Image: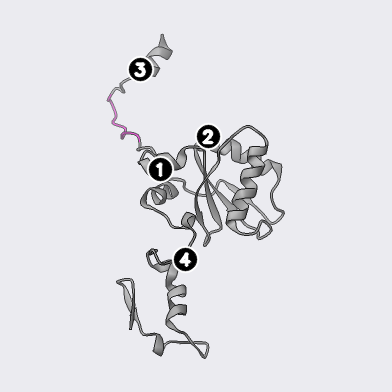
């Protein structure tokens, strides 16, 4: 018997699927999205999420840029530049196989955006092949994720009637 996660136990000799016997290796591949990644898994390093990257993935709520069946255009590059300048990390959904694998799509999108010269050092933070989504970041975002500085902490809760203290920058602006 082979144990997969703590949730259930599977006996590969008793499984059959569409009159085809399923062996233990096939069961492991089919169950893969449900279990934690281990060191012996053959997955690219950018698809295995560390706790910091997982936190950044949840911080960026949904894809803000989508690339459809017609492929990549200069407008996609310009939009990604604007989004990265505004948000630091951006999810991009790739709805086409025209660009190849998601790693190839990242390289093409990165080349297109850096060709304009408006932004340098776009980073690949994470790829989720099951959703066809790539998480892009500005230069240094991956370092701040690994250091625990990204995503930034939430603002303090609003308390009615309480005055907000001004920081140094706001005091200089008011003078």
Mark 2 neighbour density, 10 Å: few (under 14) some (14–19) many (20 or more): few
Q: Quadrant of the N terminus?
A: bottom left
Looking at marks 1 and 3 on the same chain, the residue that comes earlier in the sequence is marked by: 1
Residue at the disc numbered 1 = 145
> Gap between marks 4 and 3, in whole Å?
50 Å
| Contact check, label 3 and label 2, Cβ < 8 Å | no
The residue that mark 2 highlights is 86
90 displayed left or right of 115:
left
Q: Is residue 140 magenta?
A: no
Of the residues tagged 1 and 3, which is closer to the observer?
Answer: 1
- Residue linked to disc 3: 168
Q: Secondary structure at mark 1?
A: helix
Q: Are marks 4 and 1 in contact (CB under 8 Å)?
A: no
Q: CA distance from mark 4 to mark 2?
A: 35 Å
Please say if the residues under marks 4 and 2 sit with CB atoms less than 8 Å apart: no
Give the mark nearer the N terminus: 2 vs 1: 2
């Amino acid at each position: 018997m082979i144990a997969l996660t703590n949730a259930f136990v599977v006996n590969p000799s008793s499984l059959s699927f569409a009159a085809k016997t399923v062996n233990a290796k096939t069961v492991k591949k089919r169950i893969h999205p449900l279990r934690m990644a281990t060191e012996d898994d053959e997955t690219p390093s950018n698809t295995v999420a560390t706790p910091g990257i997982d936190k950044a993935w949840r911080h960026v709520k949904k894809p803000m840029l989508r690339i459809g069946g017609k492929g990549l255009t200069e407008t996609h590059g310009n939009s990604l530049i604007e989004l990265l300048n505004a948000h630091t990390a951006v999810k991009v959904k790739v709805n086409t196989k025209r660009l190849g694998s998601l790693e190839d799509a990242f390289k093409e999108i990165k080349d297109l955006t850096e060709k304009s010269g408006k932004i340098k050092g776009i980073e690949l933070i994470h790829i989720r092949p099951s959703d066809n989504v790539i998480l892009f970041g500005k230069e240094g975002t991956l370092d701040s994720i690994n250091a625990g500085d990204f995503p930034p902490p939430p603002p303090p809760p609003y308390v009615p009637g309480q005055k907000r203290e001004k920081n140094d920058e706001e005091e200089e602006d008011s003078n």
